Amino acid sequence: MSVVASPVSPSSLAADDRKRHRPPGPLLGFAPADAERILAHLVALDVDDRFLRFGYGIGDEGIARYVARIDFARDHVHGLTDAGGRVVALAHMAVRDGEVDFGLSVAPAWRRRGWGRTLFAHVVELAPLLRAQRVLCHSISPAVLHMAGASGFRRVGGNPAAPLVLDIPVG
């Protein structure tokens, strides 16, 4: 595990949910030194998972450019690792002009354990602390769409290609 990654404490899941779906370790905040592990996680996604995560077909080179452009000083990149330090679940929150745009992914072997939900809840919980007035999600993943709908996200204008939006009350 990287010495740069640091624990982050999500608190929005019910206690019984946390017991049933224990993550492989603490939710970590990643730093530039973790870029290689982030890249390895994302390039390991198959074609379908890449489409669901990024909203379009993206090759290894495109993913490498994406990871190279992450601004770790401004954005928030969180995830979970296995016992070997490999990233198995990842959320990237790009923070710009009062908006948080995020994407998340969970490695296939680690799905259906509630870890995507843990990351999703962390994004929604952290957004107001970052002074965001809006959270955007471009995912077409059925799992993410389900979590987004249950969390109050809506498509603006009824356009199925529009991002899902959660407006955060001010005050």
Image (cartoon, helix red, strand yellow):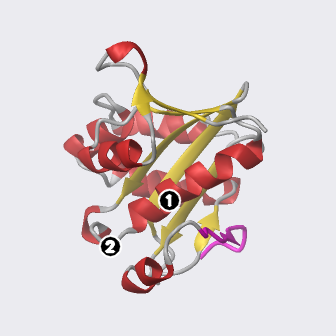
- Count the marks: 2
Where is the C terminus found, in terms of image quarters?
top right
Q: Where is residue 6 in the image (x, y as percent from the top left)?
A: 70, 70
Residue shown at the point (50%, 59%) measured from the top left: 119
Amino acid type at mark 2: Arg
Residue shown at the point (58%, 77%) measured from the top left: 26
Report the front residue among 168 and 117.
168
Where is the N terminus found, in terms of image quarters?
bottom right
Q: Mark 1 points at which residue?
A: 119
Amino acid type at mark 1: Leu
Task: Measure the alpha-carbon separation of dots 1 and 2.
Answer: 12 Å
Residue shown at the point (64%, 72%) measured from the top left: 2
Q: Is mark 1 on a helix, strand or loop?
A: helix
Q: Tell me which segment is drawn in magenta.
A: 1-11
Considering only vertical position in the picture, is 77 above or below 19? Answer: above
Q: Where is residue 149 in the image (x, y as percent from the top left)?
A: 36, 42
In the image, residue 4 lies in the stretch drawn in magenta? yes
Crowding at mark 1 (Cα within 10 Å: few <14, some 14-19, many 20+)? many
Report the front residue among 62 and 98.
98
Give residue 113's mark: 2
Give residue 170's mark: none
- Tell me, yes or no, if residue 72 can be seen here: no
Considering only vertical position in the picture, is 94 above or below 17? Answer: above
Would you say the residues marked 1 and 2 are in contact, meaning their CB atoms lie under 8 Å apart?
A: no
Residue 51 appears left or right of 118 = left
User: What secondary structure do most residues of the magenta stretch adopt?
Assistant: loop
Earlier-in-chain disc, 1 versus 2: 2
Residue shown at the point (56%, 66%) measured from the top left: 12
Q: Where is residue 153 in the image (x, y as percent from the top left)?
A: 44, 36
Residue 92 appears left or right of 24 = right
Q: What element carries label 2?
A: loop
- Tell me, yes or no, if residue 69 can be seen here: yes
